[in-house]
Amino acid sequence: MTDAGGWGLILAMAAITFALRASFIVLQERIRLPALVRRALVYVPVAALAAIVAPAFVQLGGDVGLAQQVPRWAAGLVGAAVAARTGNMVAVLIVGMLTLWGVQALLG
């Protein structure tokens, strides 16, 4: 593929992505989603975060020792507690990261 072809492909993908995302804003008043879909969309951010974070807790194989798993599990448990208590995603991220770094610093 030539440089021009590569850039053309990147621009085409960007245009398609922009059009898909903009369609929800532009067509927001014309399209009515069913109540079930609207209720389900509330859980999308939580599901996306879980999909990103969950693999860190279930690393199978490799050379992952207990010293590497303890900080992750501690941060996950503290983050889950903060989520249950506050429901604030930013607080979960901040407290979870602080917990991860703190436990890593304590364990060396």
Image (tube, rainbow, N blue to C red):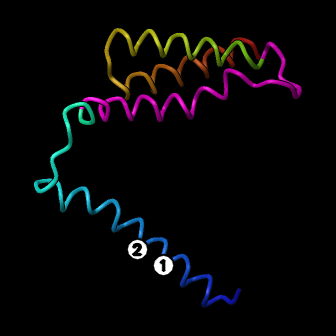
> Helix, strand or loop at disc 1?
helix
Q: Where in the figure is residue 34, as x and y percent of width and height?
A: 20, 38
Q: Main secondary structure of the magenta part?
A: helix
Q: Is residue 94 left or right of residue 26?
A: right
Q: Mark 1 highlights which residue? A: 11
Q: Where in the figure is residue 23, as x and y percent of width and height?
A: 26, 62
Q: Where in the figure is residue 56, as x and y percent of width and height?
A: 67, 27
Categorize mark 1 by other alpha carbons within 10 Å: few (<14), some (14-19), many (20+).
Answer: few
Numbered-mark total = 2
Mark 1 touching mark 2, by CB under 8 A?
A: yes
Q: Where in the figure is residue 22, as x and y percent of width and height?
A: 28, 63
Q: Mark 2 highlights which residue? A: 15
Q: Is residue 29 above or below residue 89?
A: below
Q: Which residues are magenta?
A: 39-67
Name the residue nearer the viewer: 107 or 90.
90
Residue found at x 19% / y 33%? 35
Q: Determine if the magenta segment contains residue 45.
A: yes
Q: CA distance from mark 1 to mark 2?
A: 6 Å
Q: Give, as a three-letter code, the residue at label 1.
A: Leu
Q: Is residue 49 above or below residue 17?
A: above
Q: Give, as a three-letter code, the residue at label 2.
A: Ala
